[in-house]
Image (spheres, grey):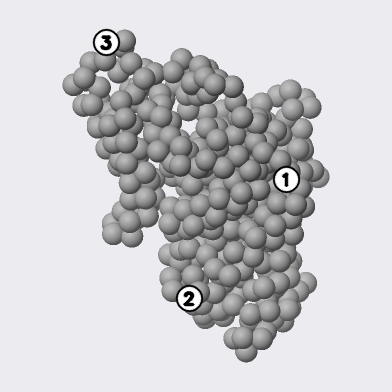
């Protein structure tokens, strides 16, 4: 049996363990870490150790483009971005900063609220990015929707809205950013081309779920929300001026990330790290100066707040991305892309390839799939702003919503709200698929009847 088949079997079994997390009662981070290590171990043993090929071992570990350490570098960028973003949001939450927004949303009508939340998420995701936006919106929903079952539906729709909103913006989704940096798409054209399909991608499932939601949200008993803070921590009285200051700096820091990237051309995690440093310094000065009598300054410090960050979810993300990186290094993903290319030809074939890549990105991760497509097709074959790149941007950005672990936004939401993989598959996946297909249909219709 080929070692490549063995690695694929390991990946599939680990993926099943992740999907059945609540059935087997094993946290998803454990199988993710195991399949990452096992996949790379089998790969290096079969290719380098057993043949005793020192040069191959060095290539697998230190390879410039496909080596383990290169994948580690790429994965670490996402992890540090996620850690810093989650910490900033937790700092805002600890200072009750989200009350600035939540107290202005007074509707208890489930239908009205889901429209407000999804539309805010959609446009904020384009300005910020889908991962950070999801973290912010989930934190807000904890304040607005107290019933766990109701909140799972809202959080799931946030994932769909965040991915749809990020697809049409050069800085809204990592895959669109990859295509933008690589020269495959340009700023004005990608916005103009994808904004309508992306809107439809959200409006289709949003309209359907509107008819499924009835009545008003459960109103918590007075004092319920104040009795216990996030994560079971006792509430801390925060002055309104402090709350507004931390909220303003935190939100400005999140919005500053894409600006920082555009100006400096440094990776997004650098901008997010800078924003965390600013809010960290601000809160230290703020609380050290006031020295709260009840010791609240210690509980509100970033050092204390770091204990609340969901580390298992970060480790899960680390494991699954490294495991996918192994499949990419072996060339498995490239073989898959080549198979699609030879099976589906012509302009119609490009649309089929795009749709399939989008759906596969829900399973494998859209970053290596887009990277594979960028490596397969030279700009001399498909020049900048070609319909192929535009459609790939849409499909890779929105197709991941079909599964809860199919996108960075979904992984973050899954970790924060402990969403069951199978629950999402049964309740939300079909809604996401409706939006995905509807948006793709609009894209193709525009190309057929407007552009040509």
Element under disc 1: loop
Left or right relative to 277: residue 128: right
Q: Quadrant of the N terminus?
A: top right
Can you identify the residue that label 2 sits on? 189
Mark 1 or mark 2: whose residue is earlier in sequence: 2
Can you identify the residue that label 1 sits on? 213
Pick the front one: 17 or 333: 17
Pick the front one: 207 or 429: 207
Q: For the residue carrying disc 1, how many other residues have a C-alpha within 10 Å: few (<14), some (14-19), or many (20+)?
A: some
| CA gap, disc 1 and disc 2 | 37 Å
Can you identify the residue that label 3 sits on? 293
* Above or below, comparing residue 230 to residue 383 in the picture: above
| CA gap, disc 3 and disc 2 | 56 Å
- State the image quarter where residue 30 is shown: top right
Pick the front one: 81 or 370: 81
**Position of residue 244 measured from the top left corner of the image (x, y, whole percent):** 32, 36
| CA gap, disc 3 and disc 1 | 46 Å
Residue at screen point 51% across, 62% down:
176
Discs 3, 2 touching: Cβ within 8 Å: no
Left or right relative to 259: residue 341: right
**Position of residue 185 measured from the top left corner of the image (x, y, whole percent):** 48, 72
Element under disc 3: loop
Left or right relative to 317: residue 272: left
* Above or below, comparing residue 112 to residue 338 in the picture: above
Residue at screen point 31% across, 53% down:
260
Mark 3 or mark 1: whose residue is earlier in sequence: 1
**Position of residue 241 measured from the top left corner of the image (x, y, whole percent):** 27, 32
Q: For the residue carrying disc 2, how many other residues have a C-alpha within 10 Å: few (<14), some (14-19), or many (20+)?
A: few
Residue at screen point 70% across, 51% down:
210
Q: Nearer the viewer, mark 3 or mark 2?
A: 3
Mark 3 or mark 2: whose residue is earlier in sequence: 2
């Amino acid at each position: 049996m080929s070692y490549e088949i063995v690695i694929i079997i390991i990946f599939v079994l680990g993926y099943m363990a992740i999907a059945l997390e609540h059935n087997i009662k094993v946290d998803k981070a454990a199988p993710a870490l195991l399949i990452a290590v096992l996949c790379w171990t089998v790969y290096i043993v079969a290719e380098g150790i057993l043949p005793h090929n020192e040069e191959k071992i060095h290539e697998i570990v230190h390879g410039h483009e496909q080596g383990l350490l290169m994948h580690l570098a790429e994965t670490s960028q996402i992890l540090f971005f996620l850690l810093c973003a989650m910490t900033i949001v937790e700092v805002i939450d600890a200072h009750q900063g989200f009350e600035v927004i939540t107290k202005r949303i007074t509707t208890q009508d489930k239908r009205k609220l889901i429209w407000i939340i999804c539309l805010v998420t959609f446009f904020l995701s384009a300005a910020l990015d889908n991962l950070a936006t999801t973290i912010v919106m989930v934190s807000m929903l904890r304040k607005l929707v107290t019933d766990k079952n109701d909140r799972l539906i809202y959080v799931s729709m946030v994932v769909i809205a965040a991915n749809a909103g990020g697809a049409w913006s050069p800085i809204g989704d990592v895959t669109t950013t990859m295509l933008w940096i690589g020269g495959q798409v340009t700023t004005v054209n990608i916005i103009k081309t994808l904004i309508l399909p992306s809107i439809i991608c959200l409006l289709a499932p949003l309209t359907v779920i509107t008819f499924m939601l009835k009545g008003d949200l459960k109103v918590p008993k007075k004092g319920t929300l104040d009795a216990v803070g996030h994560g079971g921590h006792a509430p801390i009285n925060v002055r309104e001026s402090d709350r507004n200051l931390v909220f303003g700096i935190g939100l400005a820091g999140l919005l500053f990330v894409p600006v920082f990237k555009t100006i400096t051309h440094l990776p997004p995690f650098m901008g997010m790290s800078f924003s965390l440093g600013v809010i960290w310094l601000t809160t230290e000065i703020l609380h050290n100066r006031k020295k709260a009598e009840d010791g609240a300054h210690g509980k509100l410090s970033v050092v204390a707040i770091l204990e609340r960050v969901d580390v298992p979810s970060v480790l899960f993300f680390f494991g699954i991305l490294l495991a996918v990186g192994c499949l990419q290094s072996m060339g498995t993903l490239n073989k898959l892309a080549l198979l699609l290319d030879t099976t589906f030809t012509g302009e119609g074939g490009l649309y089929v390839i795009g749709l399939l890549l989008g759906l596969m990105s829900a399973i494998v991760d859209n970053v290596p799939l887009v990277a594979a497509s960028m490596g397969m097709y030279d700009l001399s074959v498909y020049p900048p702003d070609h319909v192929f790149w535009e459609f790939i941007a849409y499909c890779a950005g929105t197709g991941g919503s079909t599964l809860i672990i199919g996108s960075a936004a979904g992984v973050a939401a899954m970790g924060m709200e402990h969403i069951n993989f199978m629950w999402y598959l049964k309740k939300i996946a079909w809604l996401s698929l409706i939006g995905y297909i509807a948006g793709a249909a609009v894209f193709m219709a525009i190309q057929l009847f407007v552009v040509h």
